[in-house]
Image (spheres, grey):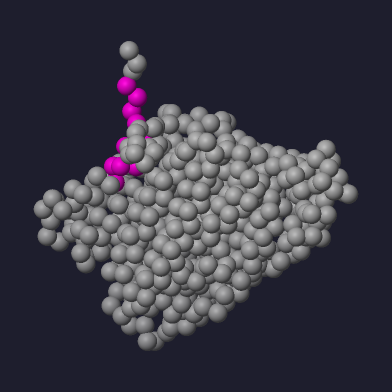
Amino acid sequence: MESFQIPWLSVITLLPLVAAFIIPLIPDKDGKTVRLYALSVGLIDLGLMVYAFWSNYKLHTTKFQLLETYAWMPQLGLNWSLAVDGLSMPLIFLSGLVTTLAILASWKVNHKPRLYYFLILVLFSAQIGVFAAQDILLFFLMWEIELVPVYLLISIWGGEKRQYAATKFILYTALASIFILVSGLALAFYGDQFTLNITELGMKDYPLALELFAYAGFLIAFGVKLPIFPLHTWLPDAHSQASAPISMILAGVLLKMGGYALIRFNIETLPHAHIKFAPLLVILGVINIVYGALTAFAQTNLKRRLASSSISHMGFILIGIASFTDLGLNGAILQMISHGLIAAALFFLSGTTYERTHTLMMDEMGGMAKLMPKTFALFTAGSLASLALPGMSGFVGELTIFLGVATSDAYSQTFKIGVIFLTAVGLILTPIYLLSMLRQVFYGENNSKLKFEGFGLDAQPREIFITACLLIPIVGIGLYPKLITNTYDSKTIQVADKMRSALPIIVQATNTNKETMISSNSLSFWQSPGFIAPRISK
């Protein structure tokens, strides 16, 4: 008789959702009980993640672990199928940490608290489902479920232009999500066997035209979420109008869904199409970095500047994904985790600043370092992490991506020099706009107009604790990156090998002589549009 195995991933995924539907039954007048209940659910789920991954997850393997498959809707071929590997496990834990801290950051929410915490818990469950789903239709359902709570959380608890920002968010992301369904079903129906299992989809042998079609659809859908220029315009509006806890989740977790899905679907499932699109991803990544940095200079709103900074930092992920090296892909995942922690800290601190000043306009602030020294110290630490100060996680992630691109044999030397030069320009601009932000907010003379009640109250123990929970891993990863890279090193090597193995297959298919291997004479197809160099190595 087989021993009973606890379905850890199902429990971790469904606990917040089930707990959310209990909230209407909780007797509560002022929201205090619901607040404690939601925080308890978040802590319990985070604790279950730590225990499940610590006791059951094995490092240095590329296989899916904690695999669970249950027939859900057999008429549609839909299974409740969950699993984790080196790519998804760190991001599930990141979502658990950031969302639990966001619940704690929502301590002062007193407007419709039942609905607020209900939506937070539903969003929590959908996030985990996106990262753990092994069925493409289940992935799509979780992706869609996650959109509704974010829309409501912005439109009800946001700023003055919250309706506009929320509507723009839902229009961009919901319309783009259709491409997931179209591309996924096109792959599922191809061939003799219909399947929705993501692993089985990656094992099919697709014609190049179908791969390119599906890749383009996935790129649009995930590019909106990441976001990629020019599909990014919803992000500054959403961030500027969302409350600080929702901005923490939006920047810390939801943007990472786009990067995760690009690796899971566009690279693992469609490696041959990735060869075609990789140079475009690099170019878009460079545009993201430079454009985001330049746009940040023009922002006088504190949260809009941080949002533009996020757009810039997401460009590094695109470059790492398209580098064709273990280092580049490793750096892309590290950048996702690092930015998730850093952005969550900065958006939370912007919220604490807003609570004191009742403004997000930097030109209306000034001289706050003397009045709020603890907040100033925490904000400075977060900003230094964002500008990639050595010793912090941002530096390790960006440096790894730089090395991945520089050592890649998949691109010509000229192309690599141009990419590195333009990316370096973005790196130079980053400390300028971040330090300028600190100067405007915390240095100089105090603005005499800032005489609101509560101004001058420094960060409280709860706020210091939330920020410390984010800054400690930022420093820990910066000083010893293996704390996190050990969880996915084997996976990045496997994915990078799959990308590289696809290169000669495509080149041979484009040559009239099928026996011709890669050489300087057989690469005219690549050298112009793709900038692919003759040498392909690990």
Looking at the image, is 425 positioned above or below residue 207?
A: below
Q: Residue furthest front?
A: 192
Residue sitting at 31 percent across and 70 percent down? 155
User: What x and y, as percent, mark residue 74?
Assistant: 34, 36
Judging depth in this view, the residue of 408 and 177 nearest the camera is 177
**Res. 309 image quadrant:** bottom right
Residue sitting at 24 percent across and 44 percent down? 18
Judging depth in this view, the residue of 15 and 535 nearest the camera is 535
Q: Which residue lies furthest to the top in this view?
A: 1
In the picture provided, is 90 more to the left or to the right than 395? left
Figure disc tally: 0
Residue sitting at 79 percent across and 54 percent down? 525
User: What x and y, as percent, mark residue 14?
Assistant: 30, 42
Q: Residue furthest bottom?
A: 449
Q: Is residue 351 visible?
A: no
Quadrant housing the N terminus:
top left
User: What x and y, as percent, mark residue 233?
Assistant: 50, 71
Magenta stretch contains residue 369: no
Judging depth in this view, the residue of 433 and 252 nearest the camera is 252
Looking at the image, is 78 positioned above or below residue 31?
A: above
Q: Is residue 19 visible?
A: yes
In the picture provided, is 178 more to the left or to the right than 39? right
Residue sitting at 60 percent across and 66 percent down? 288
Judging depth in this view, the residue of 353 and 10 nearest the camera is 10
Looking at the image, is 48 positioned above or below residue 368?
A: above
Magenta stretch contains residue 11: yes
> In the rendered structure, which segment of residues is drawn in magenta?
4-16
**Res. 48 image quadrant:** top left
User: What x and y, as percent, mark residue 538?
Assistant: 74, 40
What secondary structure is the stretch in magenta mostly built from? Answer: helix
